[in-house]
Image (cartoon, helix red, strand yellow):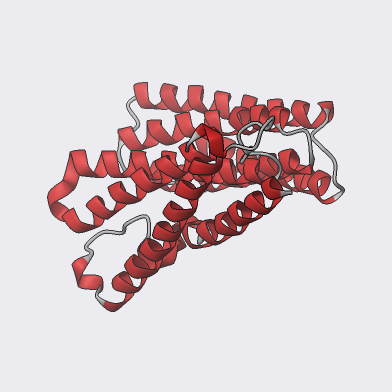
Amino acid sequence: MLDALTIATSVAALALAAWCGFAAFRDQPTKDWHFIGMAVVTLLTVVQLIVGIVQLTGGNDPEQGTTLFVAYLIGTVCAIPAVAFMSLAERSRWGSATVAAGAVVLAVLEVRLYDIWGG
Amino acid sequence: MADGAKPVGTQRTRLIGGPGMLLVWLYGVMVVGAVSRSAYQISTEFDRAPLAYSLSAIAALVYAFITYTLVRGGETARKAALACCAAELVGVLVVGTWTLVEPSAFPDATVWSDFGMGYLFIPVLLPVTAVFWLRRARTAAAV
């Protein structure tokens, strides 16, 4: 369950990165549709956080330690909202580029999360 | 900065406009990464690799300071950020080379090991980009 979610979230994050990267390439700021995309990816990370905590309380232990696992879960939830606000403050192509960079960082965090859980 | 040095009628040089915003995000990520990593490692297993973990903590401080100066803006902050980026670049290059030449000194990786390979080389690319951006910000402010 958690592994499937991790893969789904990283794919969604990479898609968001490509989409916003394309917007930056076309010299456009982030639009409403981009924010809906960011909301969807954030929702996935929230679901992942909940599933992760449920797994922990269910007695499953992450391979590389609970602290690290929870820290990464929280980090993944915060990543996209942070860049979303930054792109609101920067209404240019660079706002879109920031969101794209944020989504790439999220994808990397997901890979690390997969390793920490012991995939 | 003495207030008299400020051009009349202008605000602090904004350092987070345009590409600066992207830099702030990447530096922010490095702050969170380096701070949490060094705090975690120093508190749980400092004895295993004291040198590596101390270097990570120093890197975290440098990143935090640069992020603060970028967000604050202004000429003094710009100069401070420029100096720190140079220090950061030197740090990455020295530590990166050191980890390659003498791996035995580092039982565990630092943020700057192998020129920041574990962080997609962001640690070595970021200061170079930032120095270009900060120099350009001065030119823009002068015009």
* Residue at screen point 54% across, 48% down: A108
Rendered image quadrant of residue A83: top right
Residue B98, given in percent of the width and then of the height, sits at 29, 72
Find residue B136 and report its image quarter: bottom right
Depth check, front residue: A89 or B132: B132
Residue A82 screen position, x and y as percent: 59, 30
User: Where in the figure is residue A41, as x and y percent of width and height?
Assistant: 66, 31
Q: Residue furthest front?
A: B4
Residue sticking out furthest to the left = B47
Residue A69 visible at all = yes
Q: Which of the two residues, A51 or B54, is positioned nearer the viewer here? A: B54
Q: Is residue B17 left or right of residue A30?
A: left
Task: Work out whether residue A12 can be spotted.
Answer: no
Residue at x 49% of width, y 22% of height:
A50
The foreground one among B36 and A46 is: B36
Query: Along the horizontal axis of the image, is B127 left or right of A23?
Result: left
Residue shown at 25% from the left, 44% from the top: B41
**How many marks do you count on the picture?**
0
Residue A43 against residue A62 in the figure, above or below: above
Q: Where is residue B133 in the image (x, y as percent from the top left)?
A: 62, 53
Q: In this view, does A52 lie to the left or right of B103?
A: right
Residue pictured at 75% horizontal, 40% vertical: A96
